[in-house]
Image: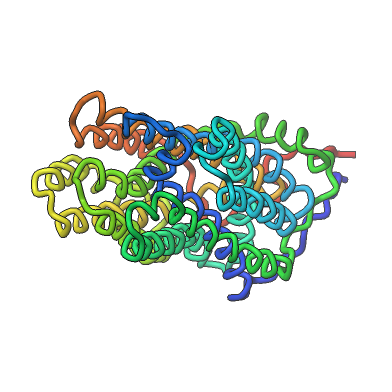
Amino acid sequence: MANETNPAATPPKATRKEVIAVVLGAAVEFFDFSAYATFAVMIGHVFFPSDNPFTSLLLSVSVFGIGFIVRPLGAIFIGSYADRVGRKPAMLLTMVFMTIGTGGLVFLPGYETIGMAAPVLLVLVRMLQGLAWGGEAGPATTFIMEAAPEGKRAFYTSWQIVAQGLAGISAGVIGYTLTVLLSPHYLAAWGWRVPFAFGLLILPIAIYLRRNLRENYQSDNSEASHSTGSLLGEVVKNYRGLVLTGIFILSGSTITQYFLNYMTTYALNELAFTPGSAMASTILIGVCVVVFSLIGGWMADRVGRKMTIIAPRLILLLLLLPGLEIINTWRSEMVFYSVITVFAALQCISGSGVLVVLCENFPKYVRSTGFSIAFAFGITLFGGTAQIVFSWLIKVTGNPVSPGYYLIAANILSLAATVMLKERKAPQPALAGRRTTVQ
């Protein structure tokens, strides 16, 4: 007989409260990163004072990128922890890491107070938060996908992207309110810390809700599930091609999304908008993410994952350069908002199919590990460097449209990888790809 494993029984379908618990936790983590991107200019002045504003900004967004460098470590250790122990404890662990990191941003003194210790500690705080986010995506996304009703997996999984939108809206509303209530002096001195304090207050609620989740995953008793190393070896041996394909698929959606997140800085530095007008773009993009991600998830369940990914991305390719040219020619707030709304709609509809199609291609026993690694490396390679590349391209070329060429290249790579990926009507079974011994 073949050696038997003990896979979990059919997982209970997710309740509304459980979806909220997962999404709220993810939203708080995305909120923190959105807030950092929104206040990158001010954070640069506090922790990296310089006579050259561009130098301060570049150092600030570089620290934003450092948080990405450690994400693969979080993906490997926390992602595999979810495959060995369960999705729930892994999601709780990421909340603890994020609480410590966010607390550091709230209370960390600036350069004028503690000198060079300030940027060093800022780097350490961002690294801890990077570990948390690197470990969050796999357990949270697989939890929702595995507990989703049949025929609604893409829609349920799209709530992970909705979390990003909710985070963006919250960061934008708080940022806009602060620009209205506070003078530029007070906003730069301490006002930028308020969003992180808000996130710190929400984190205990997210932890409480996640503690009450029903675990929907049971590890089998095979040797492959006994350690992080064995699970990582299983992914490298049998699923490295899928991981690489996933990384390339994520290139287009990641760089496009981070360009949208960069729009606050872009509006301030390139279009000379007021801080309030620039912050409003964060709110608008957040609303687009919420609305169009759900539409994309609904479409992916009906017309297929790959079609939902490919069609909007092709349209986006055609509109990127003309849209950026229009923004910089007219320099009007309404034109700016209209163009980024179109960009965000196409990006979010397309992105909704990415998470679910990657999850479905990994078998359950390495699903969190494999998805986490693909997601973390994709975000690290393309998201962690995106804002640095955008700033550098504009500085070197003197052309504010130049980031558009980078976006086009990334989206072409993403489309090519999507074509290569197999679309499945059901997730890979628990034992897919695993050898059995006949006795």
**Residue placed furthest toward the right:** 439
| The N terminus - image quarter | top right
Residue 100 falls left or right of residue 110: right
Q: Residue at x 42, y 37 (%)?
A: 61
Which quarter shows the C terminus?
Answer: top right
User: Given the current orientation, which residue lies at the most extreme bottom position?
Assistant: 16
Residue 419 percent across, percent down from the top left: 39, 40
What residue is drawn where x is 57% and y is 41%?
126
Q: Which residue lies furthest to the front in this view?
A: 113
Residue 98 appearing in the image:
yes
Q: Indicate the position of residue 120 as horizontal and vertical percent values.
A: 58, 32
Residue 271: where, in percent of width, then height? 19, 45
Q: Is residue 263 left or right of residue 211?
A: left
Whole-percent x, y for residue 219 in the image = 79, 52
Q: Vertically, is 371 above or below 275? A: above
* Residue 156 position (above or below residue 258): below
Q: Is residue 245 something one can see in this rendering?
A: no
Q: How many marks?
A: 0
Please tell me which residue is depicted at 55% across the width and 32% down the height of the picture: 241
Q: Residue at x 36, y 55 (%)?
A: 348
Q: As rendered, which of 151 and 203 lies closer to the eye? A: 203
Give the vertical position of 43 relative to 103 (above or below): above
